[in-house]
Amino acid sequence: MKGQVEKVWNNETLDGRQYKVLQINGERYSLWDDKYLDKIKEGQAVDFEFKESGEFRNITEIYDSSMNKEKETEFEDQKLRKTIRMSCLKSASRVLTGSKIPYKNRGDRAIELAKKFEKYIDDEDFDGPEGTD
């Protein structure tokens, strides 16, 4: 299930065990797992699983939606990085096509040139052009 934590309050059983009660999308859920007790805040978006036990809904697992977004963003950043690198390599190989550089050395030179293109795209300090063989 997905929802937003509307309210959180502490509770305790008659024998002294502590737990939290969460109101998510207008419904109340009990949270017993120690690993979540201090991490859940009001207003937080969560994905969660629960089991019904009589009239109670006990949360068994919580997935923080913001953590999922961070993972998705990281994946997208890696994908973009690879696309940029491939584009730089493709451009470098085109530049070197027909050059007098021996065929067996062109791969290394293409990678070297692609790294320069990548540095330029990233706005890092750019050394300027080097002569080619």
Image (spheres, rainbow, N blue to C red):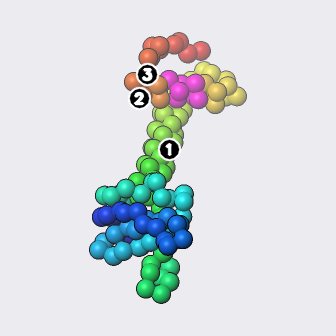
Numbered range of the magenta stretch: 110-116
> Mark 3 or mark 1, which has the lower sequence index?
1
Give the overall secondary structure of the magenta segment. Answer: helix
Taking the image as shown, residue 95 lies to the left or right of residue 27, namely: right
Q: Amino acid at mark 1?
A: Gln
What label sits on residue 124 in the rendered view? Answer: 3
Q: Does residue 127 appear in the picture of this structure?
A: yes
Residue at 50% x, 79% y is 51
From the viewer's perspective, is residue 43 above or below residue 17? Answer: above
Nearer the viewer's eye, disc 1 or disc 2? 1
Tag 2 secondary structure: helix
* Disc 1 element: helix
Query: Where residue 96 appears, x then y in whole percent?
Result: 54, 27
Residue 86 colored in magenta in the image: no
Position above or below: 102 against 33: above
Q: Label 2 belongs to which residue? A: 121
Q: Count of labels shown?
A: 3
Q: Nearer the viewer, mark 3 or mark 2?
A: 3
- In the displayed structure, 37 sits above or below 93; it is below
| Label 2, residues with CA under 10 Å away: few <14, some 14-19, many ≥20 | few
Image coordinates of residue 72 in percent, x first then y, are 45, 53
Disc 3 + disc 2, Cβ < 8 Å: no
Tell me the residue that label 1 is attached to. 78
Q: Residues within 10 Å of mark 1 (few under 14, many from 20)?
A: few
Residue lying at 39% horizontally and 24% vertically, measured from the top left: 123
Which residue type carries mark 2?
Ile
Q: Are marks 1 and 2 in contact (CB under 8 Å)?
A: no
